[in-house]
Structures are given as structure tokens and as C-alpha cells.
Image (cartoon, rainbow, N blue to C red):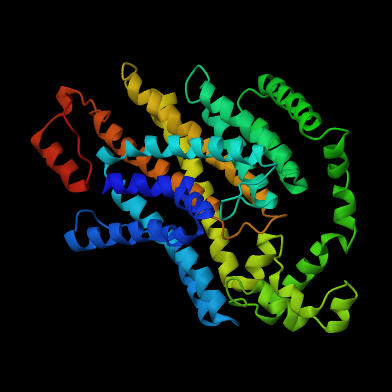
């Protein structure tokens, strides 16, 4: 089953079935292969009881909120489609937690992390050569999705490159490709999020003076790339319209769409209008006269999206779903904090045998990936202000990988706690059978030194 999980990760990250179906449309049914494998793994575990099926409780609560919202959705067909996507990610989360809960299987996590970073190389190269899109991909065939994805790639690869004392050149190369990918997307929101994420990484770094120089080099490289990809200052002219876009109510309709999102929330404040029901609801709350002032008919708004995941959550999932979604992010941050605490306790403070270099290297790798996913989540959250990336799998990937690293270090810390447990030294003249029995009854056990 572990090999099947790795195959599932490969299909999830690289989507070869989508590539084949793009060039041979008759092979479209191949797109269902990952779902078949996912349900096959779960069926095998349930029937043969090879592994205990574990679920992530914060995600379970979020799934239940989406389910309730689906039941009361205005368009239950769209609602079921949205719920199905969340449910499949929930099952994928459960499969990972179940199969990788055993320490001997956690070595597969290294393979998963390598594939994850490699996906940014593949999509980055394809996207750059196709001017900011990956034509065959279900999400990345749009600049507004490709740019945020490359933002995540920048954060993950450049931080994970320092998992060893000598930076990993492959990861650094991936970071460079991702930076070029952000520029190639020509997306203003992605550029703003890229800058803000870079500042967050610098702020969280231990040596801010040294990393300020790195940040400056990255900025010079970024500016140079813009002039190569977009001659005649075209890139910065586009970025210069950011202020106009934020102030002009009619620019791309973003202000109008956000306002409509709040109106939908006002109508359905508890459970929302239902997953993927944002566009379906806009024609119902927009008069024909109001639509014509924007040069459209009301029915044409049914294909529009919120361009803001927080407005979309409020409109589609209501207060209950929004709280559950916030809970997912808070749990993510709690696990990131615990990952750092584990490292400080067992590595930085001599809780680990100094001669066990392989274990120390693995812990450093997990620490840096944990920080990388934290910065990537910042990039996702910031991009969510500008783009409709709520139901993209990137958010769930970050939750899953963060949980797997946390669980790995949790199991390691329990093992180290047993190995490093030391006896309480008691002077011989204070020992007596009576004292020992009294301490046993009180729950205080004095273990012998060994």
C-alpha cells in the first residue's frame, strides 16, 4: 500500500493523465485513475485491516460544515461537486495519516517531499515556455492560478534548500525557476504576495542582516527577469496599475463581485449559499438594470468568481464554515510551532546524541520543510485575497505535509524521550524499603540509573 500511496502522490502532483487526455481527448476517462486508486487503498485497508484508519479531526469538522452547507445549498448539484472535492481531499489526508503513522513507513515522506519540490520545476518550466500557463493542467491553465502556485514554489524551495549546512543546489535552482514563473504569470496579486512572502521569510530568519543581502540579490534578479521577459518596461507598467485596480470600482469588477459576496452572506449568514454557489447566486441578487450599467446581462454573472477566498467562504459556507476554515489554519500554525519546539528541545538543547548525525540531519530537514510550508501558507493566504484558489489542492497539500512532518517529529520525540530518560540520583543513606513504597503509592517513581 505504501507504493500505491507514492503513485497516488505522483499522479496528484504531476497529473500525467491530464497531459495524455489533453492531446488525446478520447482518453479523458483516464482522469479518474487517481480517484480509483484512492478509494481502492481505503477499501483494502478497511477489508484487510492492514492499517488503522486515522483522520484529522480539524479537517473532519471542516468537512462536516461543508456537508451541511451542501444540504442547504441553493444549487445542490454545484454543492455536491464542491463537497466531492473536499471529501476526496479528506480521504487523501486520511490515507496519508494512516499509512505513514508507523515510523518505519515515514521514510516514504522523504520521497513525497522530493516529488513535491520537483513539481515546481516541471510546471515552472512548462509555464514559463507557455507564457504563464500550463495548458493541460486543470488549474494552472490560467495565469491567476499559475502565479500563486509559483509563489508557493519560491517559499518551499528556497527555504528547504538550507536543510543542510551547504545549500542544496537543486532546490536553489527550483527557487530561481519559481521566481521566473511568478514574473511570467504577469499577475499583479501574485507579485504583491511574492514580495510580502519574501519579507515574511526575512522577518522569521535568524540572521536578518545576512538574509537582507540575499533578499537584495533576489530583488535584483527579479527586476532583471522582468526586463528580459517583458521588454519596454511592460511588466512594471502592468504592476503600476495595482493602485488603480484597488480604487476603481469597475476595474475587472472585483469591488462589485466582493460586494455581491457580502450580500449573499447577508442572505445566508449561518451555512452560506452552498459550495460553488457564489456565481449561481449573483444573477439572483443583481437586477438587470444594475448589470447593464456594467455592460452585461445579469445571467452572465453566473460564471464569475469572487477573486477572494475569504469572501467566497463567507458567501458559500457562511459563519460556520468560515470558523471551521479558520480552525484549519490555526491548527496548521500550532503544528508549525510544535515542529520548532521539538527541534529546540531535542536538537538545539542537547536532547540528542551528538554522534547520531543521520538523525540530526533528518531533524534539520524536517525543521526546514516545516518552515518552508509555513511560508508557503503565508503565500497562499495572501494570494487568496486576489484569486479564487479556495478549492485548489495546494491548500490541502500544505495541511497534509505539515501534519506528516509534525507526526514524524512527534514519534521521534517520544522515542528520544525514552532513550534520554535519566534516573533521579538519591543518596544511599536515604534509601529504605518504606521510602520506596511510599513514593510508589504517591505516583513518584524513582528509576535506577543505567
Task: Pinpoint residue 69: horizontal percent, then vertical percent.
Answer: 54, 76
| Number of numbered discs overlaid on the protein picture | 0
Task: Pinpoint residue 153: horizontal percent, then vertical percent.
Answer: 58, 38
Task: Pinpoint residue 307: horizontal percent, then vertical percent.
Answer: 71, 60
Q: Nearer the viewer, residue 232 or 113?
A: 232
Q: At 70% across and 60% down in the image, what residue appears?
A: 308
Q: In this image, 22 relative to 208: left or right?
A: left
Q: At 63% across and 66% down in the image, what residue appears?
A: 313
Q: At 49% across and 17% down in the image, what residue appears?
A: 165
Q: In this image, 235 relative to 136: left or right?
A: right
Q: Nearer the viewer, residue 341 or 175?
A: 175
Q: Quadrant of residue 277?
A: bottom right
Q: Measured along the vertical axis of the image, is residue 278 above or below residue 150? A: below
Q: Quadrant of the C terminus?
A: top left
Q: Quadrant of residue 411?
A: top left
Does residue 41 appear in this view? yes
Report the residue that reaches farthest toward the left. Answer: 433
Q: In this image, 150 relative to 306: left or right?
A: left
Q: In this image, 359 relative to 323: left or right?
A: left
Q: Measured along the vertical axis of the image, is residue 440 above or below residue 362? A: below
Does residue 57 appear in this view? no
Q: Nearer the viewer, residue 41 or 54?
A: 41
Q: Measured along the vertical axis of the image, is residue 166 above or below residue 10? A: above
Q: At 60% across and 26% down in the image, what residue appears?
A: 206
Q: Quadrant of residue 47?
A: bottom left
Task: Pinpoint residue 398: horizontal percent, then vertical percent.
Answer: 51, 47
Amino acid at each position: 500500500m505504501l507504493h500505491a500511496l507514492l503513485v497516488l502522490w505522483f499522479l496528484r502532483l504531476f497529473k500525467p493523465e491530464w497531459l495524455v487526455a489533453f492531446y488525446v481527448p478520447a482518453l479523458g476517462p483516464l482522469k479518474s485513475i487517481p480517484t480509483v486508486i484512492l478509494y481502492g487503498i481505503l477499501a483494502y485497508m478497511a477489508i484487510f485491516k492492514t492499517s488503522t484508519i486515522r483522520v484529522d479531526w480539524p479537517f473532519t469538522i471542516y468537512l462536516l460544515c461543508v456537508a451541511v452547507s451542501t444540504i442547504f445549498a441553493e444549487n445542490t448539484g454545484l454543492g455536491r461537486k464542491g463537497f466531492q472535492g473536499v471529501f476526496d481531499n479528506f480521504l487523501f489526508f486520511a490515507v496519508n495519516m494512516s499509512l505513514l503513522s508507523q515510523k518505519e513507513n515515514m521514510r516514504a515522506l522523504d520521497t513525497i517531499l522530493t516529488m513535491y519540490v520537483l513539481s515546481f520545476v516541471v510546471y515552472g518550466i512548462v509555464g514559463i515556455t507557455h507564457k504563464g500557463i500550463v495548458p493541460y493542467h486543470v488549474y494552472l491553465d490560467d495565469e491567476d492560478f499559475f502565479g500563486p502556485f509559483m509563489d508557493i514554489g519560491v517559499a518551499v524551495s528556497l527555504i528547504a534548500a538550507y536543510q543542510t549546512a551547504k545549500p542544496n543546489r537543486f532546490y536553489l535552482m527550483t527557487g530561481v525557476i519559481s521566481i521566473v514563473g511568478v514574473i511570467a504569470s504577469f499577475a499583479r496579486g501574485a507579485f504583491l504576495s511574492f514580495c510580502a512572502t519574501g519579507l515574511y521569510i526575512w522577518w522569521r530568519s535568524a540572521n536578518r542582516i545576512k538574509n537582507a543581502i540575499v533578499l537584495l540579490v533576489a530583488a535584483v534578479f527579479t527586476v532583471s527577469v522582468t526586463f528580459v521577459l517583458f521588454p519596454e518596461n511592460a511588466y512594471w507598467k502592468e504592476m503600476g496599475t495595482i493602485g488603480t485596480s484597488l480604487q476603481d470600482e469597475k476595474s475587472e469588477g472585483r469591488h462589485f463581485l466582493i460586494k455581491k459576496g457580502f450580500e449573499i452572506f447577508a442572505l445566508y449568514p449561518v451555512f452560506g449559499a452552498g459550495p460553488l454557489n457564489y456565481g449561481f447566486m449573483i444573477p439572483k441578487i443583481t437586477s438587470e438594470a444594475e448589470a447593464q450599467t456594467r455592460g452585461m446581462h445579469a445571467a452572465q454573472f453566473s460564471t464569475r468568481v469572487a477573486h477572494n477566498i475569504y469572501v467566497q467562504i463567507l458567501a458559500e459556507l457562511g459563519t460556520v464554515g468560515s470558523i471551521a476554515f479558520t480552525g484549519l489554519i490555526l491548527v496548521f500554525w500550532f503544528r508549525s510551532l510544535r515542529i520548532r519546539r521539538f527541534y529546540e528541545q531535542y536538537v538545539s538543547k542537547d536532547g540528542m546524541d551528538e554522534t547520531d548525525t543521520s538523525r540530526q540531519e533528518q531533524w534539520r530537514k524536517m525543521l526546514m520543510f516545516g518552515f518552508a510550508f509555513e511560508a508557503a501558507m503565508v503565500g497562499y493566504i495572501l494570494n487568496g485575497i486576489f484569486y479564487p484558489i479556495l478549492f485548489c489542492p495546494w491548500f490541502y497539500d500544505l495541511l497534509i505535509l505539515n501534519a506528516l512532518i509534525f507526526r514524524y517529529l512527534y514519534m521521534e520525540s517520544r522515542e528520544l524521550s525514552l532513550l534520554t530518560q535519566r534516573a533521579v540520583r538519591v543518596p544511599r543513606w536515604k534509601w529504605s524499603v518504606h521510602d520506596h513504597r511510599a513514593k510508589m503509592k504517591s505516583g513518584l517513581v524513582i528509576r535506577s540509573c543505567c
